[in-house]
Image (cartoon, rainbow, N blue to C red):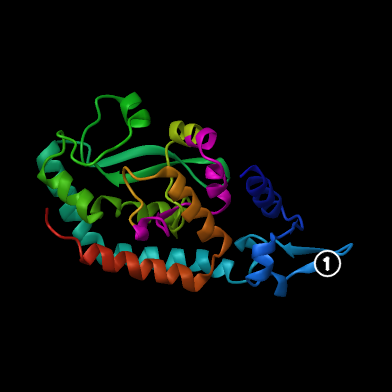
Amino acid sequence: RHVEVVARLCGALGCEVLLVPTAVELLSGAGERAEHLCGIPCVTLAHGPQGRPTWYAKRAFDVVAAALALAVVWPLMAACAIAVRIEGGPGVLFRQRRVGMGGRTFVLLKFRTLKPADEAEADTRWSVDGDERMGPVGCFLRRTSLDELPQLWNVLRGDMSLVGPRPERPYFVERFSNEYSGYAMRHRVPVGITGWSQVHGLRGDTSIALRARFDNHYIDTWSFWGDLKILLLTIQAVFMVKAP
């Protein structure tokens, strides 16, 4: 596992990385891509997505799509804000520090679905479904992911992308980076509103190790068309939400 982390880190730094495949990998097709160094078969690790020409289209698409989405859904966002205000009083938006690309922190925006006891709880308490402090509006916003709509502004600001690994709080990033090999490597690309993990049901109280593997697979195999597929799957999942 440590070799995998080091290899990915070197690749992210722009180094040429050669990996020696196992016999099974050679027989299953890796041998067709293998080069030879002093007679030893090696496979070149692909560089990160930032080195591909289509990577620049990702940011351009984010800006255009987020701006258009805000122009279309602002009445829905206004309705959500009014509902939150009526149910929970002042403080419609919830602001929280999250870790983005390269380990940089930013302030993530969401519609408030419940009021934490204090700032320490908001930063260190793992959120679970069925919190008794959530009212009907908060439950509905979470179940439909409408509470995430303000993050379109984070996308416009450049804090996030539409598609990427979900951002986590600094406390949990430090904890998970120590507990799960490869977790910190999720921050090689911009974090996103939705991602490969989320469209496979890995959100909320699910396996962190599995999420890290899905997120790193997304980064290693990134393509612009793959992002569009994830967005379509996300839209499909939102419209298929069923009442509890």
Image: 180 above or below 216: above
Left/right of residue 66 with respect to residue 21 in the rendered view: left
Q: Secondary structure at mark 1?
A: strand
Q: Amino acid at mark 1?
A: His
Q: Is residue 64 magenta?
A: no
- Expressed as whole percent of the image width and height from the top left, the position of residue 50 reads 62, 61
Residue at 63% in and 46% down: 5
Residue at 58% in and 51% down: 188
Q: Is residue 4 visible in this depiction of the protein? A: yes
The image quadrant of residue 45 is bottom right
**Where's the N terminus, which quadrant?**
top right
Tell me if mark 1 has few (under 14), some (14-19) or many (20+) residues whose alpha carbon lies within 10 angstroms of its own: few
Residue at 70% in and 60% down: 21
Residue span colored magenta = 176-200
Task: Residue under label 1, please give it.
Answer: 36
Q: Is residue 186 magenta?
A: yes
The image quadrant of residue 239 is bottom left
Image: 89 above or below 219: above
Image: 57 above or below 181: below
**Front-most of 34 and 176?**
34
- Expressed as whole percent of the image width and height from the top left, the position of residue 80 reads 18, 52
